[in-house]
Image (spheres, grey):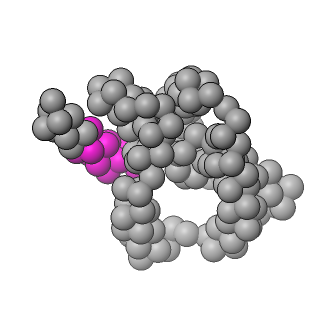
Amino acid sequence: MFSLTIAIIAGIGILIGLLSGLFGIGGALIATPLLKVFAGLPPLLALASPLPAAIPSAISGSIVYHRNRLIDFTIAKVILLCAIPLNYIGVEATKYVDGQILMILTGAFLLMVGCTFFIRGWMLKEEKTYEVQRSLKVLIPAGIATGFLSGLLAIGGGIVL
């Protein structure tokens, strides 16, 4: 039984790595329901377990994006200054929300993310240029929402943004 569970978790890790590379998203959002359903982990353990695995992905992705000059450090700084404290608050909030509710919220967020992929696909078909919003009126709420949701649902901030 133990080796089967390890094999299932390893298979989920391989799938998440592949999907992350293909679609440029973190794996925690997808790994959480897979770990709950197929590996039988309790909800809070399924939520938190993928987080340490996200660190190498985030570092390697950041290096590649930085080399290609695709990081706007002004935007990143404002988002991080807002997101980090709210991330802690989101993590603390998990103490007061039932694990099943967190799983449902994660599933709802995953559905929303899936829908946004269709919208982004339509946007990319149109050859328009979009002006970058560096307004604090946009960046501060984005950082707050990103930090809180990332902490509450144990998902990467990139997918929230």
Of the 4 image quadrants, the one containing the N terminus is top left
| Side of 119 where 60 appears, left or right | left
Q: Is residue 5 magenta?
A: no
Q: Nearer the viewer, residue 64 or 80?
A: 80
Q: Is residue 23 magenta?
A: yes
Examine the rendering and report whether any part of residue 30 can be seen. no
Q: Residue drawn at (56%, 29%), measured in percent from left and top?
A: 99
Q: In the displayed orientation, state which residue is furthest to the front.
A: 1
| Residue at point 40%, 47% (across, down) | 50
Q: Nearer the viewer, residue 21 or 47?
A: 47
- When asked about the image quadrant of residue 33, the answer is top left
x then y, percent, for residue 151: 62, 49
Which secondary structure type mostly characterizes the magenta part of the structure? helix
First to last magenta residue range? 11-25
Residue 49 visible (yes or no): yes
Left or right: residue 97 versus residue 158 is: right
Q: Position of residue 83 (x, y in %)?
A: 70, 59
**Occupied quadrant, residue 6:** top left
The structure residue drawn at horizontal position 33% and vertical position 27%, both measured from the top left corner, is: 40
* Residue 87, percent from left and from top: 67, 54
Report the side of 142 relative to 119 (left or right): right
- Residue 161 in picture, x, y percent from top left: 62, 49
Q: Image point 38% across, 38% down: which residue? A: 31
Q: Nearer the viewer, residue 67 or 50?
A: 50
